[in-house]
Amino acid sequence: MACPFVQEEVFFHGDHFRVNLSDLAKSNLFGIDGREADTQLPGIADRLLEPLSEGRGRYGEDMSVIVALALRELGAARRTERDAGSWTITGSTTAAGEDWQEFEVIHKVTGGQGRIVTTRRGAPPQERAAAHRRIQREYTLIKSLHQESIVPPGDLAQDDGNTVLIYPQLADYEPLDLAVVNRSLTAEQQIEVLSQVADAVAYAHRNQVSNRGLSSSSVLINTGLLDDDHKVEIRLADWSWASRIHSTNSPSTTLLGSPTRVSTPDDDVYQAPEDRWSPSADRIAVDVFSLGALAYFRFSDEAPARNRADLVSRLRADNGLDLAASGGRFVDEHLRDLVLRATNPLVSKRVDTDAKTGLPRFGATEFRAELEKYSAERLKEVEPEADPMNPLPGSELADSRFEVVKVLGSGSTARGALVIDHEDAGARRVPKVGLDDSKASVLHDEADVLTQLGQQNPKIPGLVEIIGRPLDIGGHTTLLLTDCGEQSLSDLVRHMALNETQLQTWGTELLDTVVALDAAAIAHRDIKPSNLGMAP
């Protein structure tokens, strides 16, 4: 005798409720007959009186009794834990969206805590396959980023047939919009929040990654450190909308970064007016707008707009988000101009596109520099010494030996700036300033390698050179390097078409350098377009 087919059903018998789920999610859910309009569920009689489906046999009274007894004895217990690779998923969901869920996880061996992002359980096979491709892309894209404010995924695992991303747990961190509800940040703290966000975005841009989802809820701030020590430490842990900057199309982005994910109205008001999913959208300009919208939120203490339609209306009327038109506290003209510039609805004006070359002259790096300029002017009486981590053009470092020309950005180890060396006939140099004491040993090791390479005979072409031994600038270990150009290969290929002759010439030069390094028994291990400077 064949095993009978059993279909589960859920019957809601309450009087006052309404189910606002999609039709697919409401499958096999039923309510009280006659209350369909109130509950948005079909009546239970629809199923009880449903005719027998084709292809399924009828079962008599004996089998019905057997099935009823079996179900009574079977029982059911909710499974509160399950495994995903080396991790154990604990408890219920901590967050959820249209097609995803988030859980807390614990590593089976180390006991380390994290959070897991996965598709909804019970999703159809085609949805799981699409999610697998998107998750793989997100993991590959973000895992390569190494910057203190960017939180990349820590692991890729399987959860009941679903591919999932596992991120480290961020204790004491809260979304910025929630953290400031019961806290007031000082002007200096506001600037620091925006500066750290801009640093992270600028680093991602140099590595050809655009966030495309910055908002007040995607920026996390360490409230424990803020409350106890009044220090600002932010993290960008949500890169689910991210994509490659140089990509000309985006048919498959990331798990939570595909157009199928529905963003919230609160997040939408931080996004640029142009379609961020368009293949022709300038993805750097998209992030610059979000930086400007975040600045508006912090300086005015109110959201950029009530909703998306209101945002578009404001941008059309004011050519950007105007702090002077907000109902919040007063902000000086420097910050007002900065926010207006970053949120200009015209992309060419937002990123200050050069009419001749077509290259943008304003991005996340320049946005941060403007914030530092404001801070320096505001605090110049109490902080006369230039900060080597945040130097301004025209400021001096190392007892006036170096004059800063331009800030070049930061990475996982150090921050760089282009300077004029007054002790070397005005030569242009690049001090590579360690972020903190923990980076000192890494920089000393790098100095030893560069010194060794500089002693090779014949000289290895195409390498940056170190000038002398490591310096101490403002308490930071610093390497003084030769200037290898203000633009990287990454910058060039992103903004202009290169001909075959240029590519062949540069490719040959790069291969010559790699062969010479191999002969010297040195492995670079991080050759990529953003690390290849285009020397003048």
Image: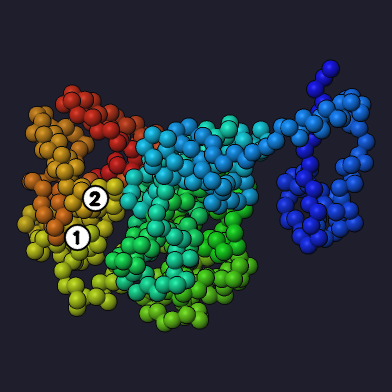
Helix, strand or loop at label 2? It is: strand
Question: Which residue is at 89% across, 45% downward?
Answer: 46
Question: Which residue is at 23% across, 53% downward?
Answer: 435
Visible residue check, residue 491: no
Residue type indicated by callout 1? Pro
Q: Which residue is mark 2?
A: 414
Question: Which residue is at 37% across, 72% downward?
Answer: 185
Q: Which mark is residue 421?
A: none
Residue type indicated by callout 2? Ala
| Vertical relation: 388 (above or below) 498 | below
Visible residue check, residue 81: yes
Q: Quadrant of the N terminus?
A: top right
| Vertical relation: 9 (above or below) 404 | above
Helix, strand or loop at label 1? It is: loop
Q: Which residue is mark 1?
A: 388
Q: Quick one: label 1, few (<14), some, or many (20+) residues within 10 Å? A: many
